[in-house]
Image (cartoon, rainbow, N blue to C red):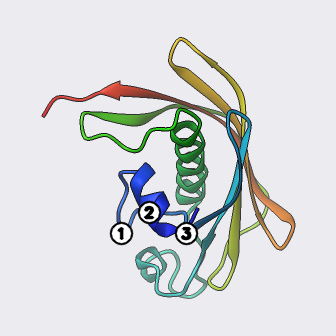
Amino acid sequence: MDINDILQHLPHRYPFLLIDRVTEFHAGESLVGYKNVTFNEPFFQGHFPERPIMPGVLILEAMAQATGLLAFKTVERGARRESLYFLVGMDKVRFKKPVEPGDQLVLSAKLLRAKRGIWVFDCEASVDGNTVATAQIMCTEQDIEH
């Protein structure tokens, strides 16, 4: 999936779209993609000026966006204006190493189960083959009012 396909499946836009490309997709099973982390990211101005590090919550958000792509591509539906894919929980969150400008953040999501509208995924973020973060992420799709 290139960026145009990603934009069809996620409602996120700059500066909050945190996945640039999908390199592997297996419907109902797994997805691998990446985010190219550049010095031009707006969060680096304040986190931290003397040593820029990608905030951990944004690494988690990037993993959550990977789960959204896996779910939407699995059910063969793009992002809809009348519903949103909400994060409902995270367990077993661990950060191993910092992510810095110039890194390519590889995002892996594996579907563990989907039951009663709750999707549960095992996720990992890595740089150069080294794990930087892991989490079990739970999400659900809900209708929204305009």
Tell me where residue 34 sits by quadrant.
Answer: bottom right
- For label 3, the SS is loop
The residues bearing labels 1 and 2 have C-alpha atoms spaced at a distance of: 5 Å
Of the numbered discs 1 and 3, the one sitting upstream in the chain is 1
- Asked if marks 1 and 3 touch (Cβ < 8 Å), the reply is no
Q: Amino acid at mark 3?
A: Asp
Residue 132: horizontal and vertical position, in percent? 76, 61
- For label 2, the SS is loop
Residue at point 58%, 70% (across, down): 54
Report if residue 88 is visible in the image: yes
Q: Name above or below for residue 137 compared with residue 105.
A: above
Q: Name above or below for residue 33 compared with residue 136.
A: below
Q: Which mark is residue 20?
A: 3
- Give the residue number, with chain letter if any, for mark 2: 17
Q: Name above or below for residue 126 compared with residue 73.
A: below
Judging depth in this view, the residue of 7 and 14 nearest the camera is 7
Give the foreground label among 1 and 3: 3
Q: Residue furthest left?
A: 146
Residue at point 65%, 78% (across, down): 100
- Give the residue number, with chain letter if any, for mark 1: 14
**Label 1 environment density (alpha carbons within 10 Å; few <14, some 14–19, many ≥20):** few
- For label 1, the SS is loop
User: Number of callouts in the render?
Assistant: 3
- Asked if marks 3 and 2 touch (Cβ < 8 Å), the reply is no
The residues bearing labels 3 and 2 have C-alpha atoms spaced at a distance of: 8 Å
Q: Quadrant of the N terminus?
A: bottom right
Tell me where residue 112 sits by quadrant.
Answer: top right
Q: Residue furthest top?
A: 116
